[in-house]
Image: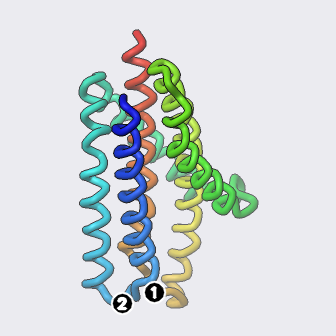
Amino acid sequence: MAQGGKIRMILTFIILIVILIGLTYALINVDPQNILASNLIWTLLVFMIGVLLIPTIWFGRLTDVVGLAGIVTILITSMVGLAGYYYGDQIITFNWDEYLNYALWFLIAVIIIGPFLIKNPKQMMNFYLVISIISLVIFVLLLLSNHKKLKEDSVKCIDGKVIPNYPLESYSLFIKIINIFQDLVRILGTMNSRK
């Protein structure tokens, strides 16, 4: 890929990340009782993520791994969800979300800088494979923590201490599941293309 193409790709990625962060910030800070605004922001976020998912699905179809990645995503999501909900207190003994979020920001920085340092296509494939494996681990752990938090929040909602923000809660789950799916497509697709 030419240097100009890499720069355009990176700039597009950065712009989309900034828009996603802006919409996510808006969803976090909107009043949960403002149903119209929170659901509109949620819809925009889901639509944008759906559009961003097109290249992943295209790559997955080219490498014939979309179905397998979907099945593995469902299995991982189900097992991690049950573990987080029923055993979250025993597994998560400290607030690891902060450290995982730092790791995620560091990973984003590596994704932005990495393509400028790698010249060889084989090294680029290895780079994205390693990034995808690390990202998969981070999002599985975040999903585990998310289910523990959902259980804790559900008790507060029953007591009336907290007004539930269903769009924010569902988006939080959705973004983690989508990232797990994307990582699996990249991992399985890269491994499949090497055969």
Q: Residue at x 64, y 60 (%)?
A: 97
Estimate how packed mark 1 is, as few (under 14), some (14 to 19) or many (20 or more) residues with alpha carbons within 10 Å: few
Q: Residue at x 51, y 86 (%)?
A: 162
Image: 97 above or below 11: below
Estimate how packed mark 2 is, as few (under 14), some (14 to 19) or many (20 or more) residues with alpha carbons within 10 Å: few
Q: Residue furthest right?
A: 93
**Residue at disc 1, secondary structure:** loop
Tell me the residue that label 2 is attached to.
Answer: 33
Image: 124 above or below 82: above
**Rendered location of residue 51, percent (x, y):** 24, 52
Q: Residue at x 51, y 36 (%)?
A: 116
**Residue at disc 2, secondary structure:** loop
Q: Quadrant of residue 181?
A: top left
Asked if disc 2 and disc 1 are in contact, CB closer than 8 Å, the reply is: yes
Q: Tell me the tag on residue 163.
A: 1
**Rendered location of residue 14, percent (x, y):** 42, 55
Number of numbered discs overlaid on the protein picture: 2
Residue 21 visible in the shown view: yes
Q: Tell me the tag on residue 122.
A: none
**Rendered location of residue 48, percent (x, y):** 28, 59
Image: 122 above or below 75: above
